[in-house]
Amino acid sequence: MAIPECKPIPRLPVPREIVFPGGAALSQVLAAGSQIPSGLDAATNLLAQASPAMAPLMPIFNIIDAVLSLVECVQAVPDALGPPPDPAKMADALSRLAEKLPKLLDLVPQVATPRMVIGMVDTLIDFLEGLRDQIEAILLQAERTQAARAKAEELGDENLLHIAGCAEAQGQAQLQAMTDALAPMNTLVSALNLLLGLLGLPEVPAFDGLIDSANPDAGFAALDALVDTLRRIRDAVPLP
């Protein structure tokens, strides 16, 4: 019987980096583990870093793009005047400039602020609705755990009582973690309120204190009221 050959040991992918204007570079960060990372793992890691890093540079690139189109228009002036007059290059240059200028409108506060506010409000609504769904799921699981505990007490099953106790502690820990997760959101809420003030809209109340891990049912009304407030604010945002 032939001895099967060993599978070839994969090698680490070729290291890559993305160099930004000014010389700053992003390099791959490959986590050490039981498996050697593949080229896909390495590329995904680098792209995950590059996406948020490039976002702040896009307005600069848009400005440069518009300036270059404007320079092209200026350079086309002599040909447009002649002799003989040839406005074709000027028309093409103006057409390209017209395509670039709308991107610069996002830099104007009157245009950019409403769009930013809508994005932040939509994200907060998604967060609160997702939080409510998770709390409801935990409470349903708590009801099943209580039923299991009652059955275990009826049967005198110590093992089942122990499992039910662990499940109850885990559910309470999850509720506490969700309660604690609300407080850091106030940083985003504070920034949002500054923008809402610029637009003449009411402020969003603070998120902490909405949920009491000891009595989560009481927080549903507060969560629903806050979501309704955010929806009304969103509808009132003046779009350009």
Image: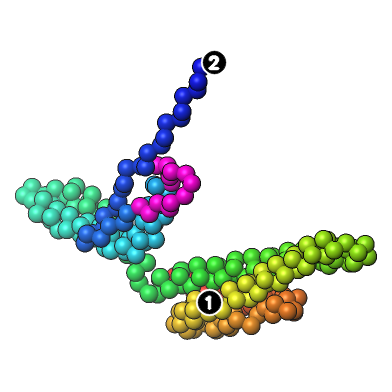
Is 148 within the magenta?
Answer: no
Residue shown at 46% from the left, 30% from the top: 7
SS of the residue under disc 1: loop
Q: Which residues are magenta?
A: 28-41
In the displayed image of the protein, which residue is found farthest to the left? Answer: 83
Q: Position of residue 105 (x, y in %)?
A: 35, 66
- Amino acid type at circle 1 is Pro
Residue 10 located left or right of residue 64? right
SS of the residue under disc 2: loop
Badge count: 2
Q: Nearer the viewer, residue 83 or 185?
A: 185
Q: Which of the labelled discs sits on residue 1, or is there none?
A: 2
- Amino acid type at circle 2 is Met
Residue shown at 41% from the left, 37% from the top: 10
Q: Position of residue 1 (x, y in %)?
A: 54, 15
Residue shown at 57% from the left, 83% from the top: 206
| Secondary structure mainly formed by the magenta segment | loop
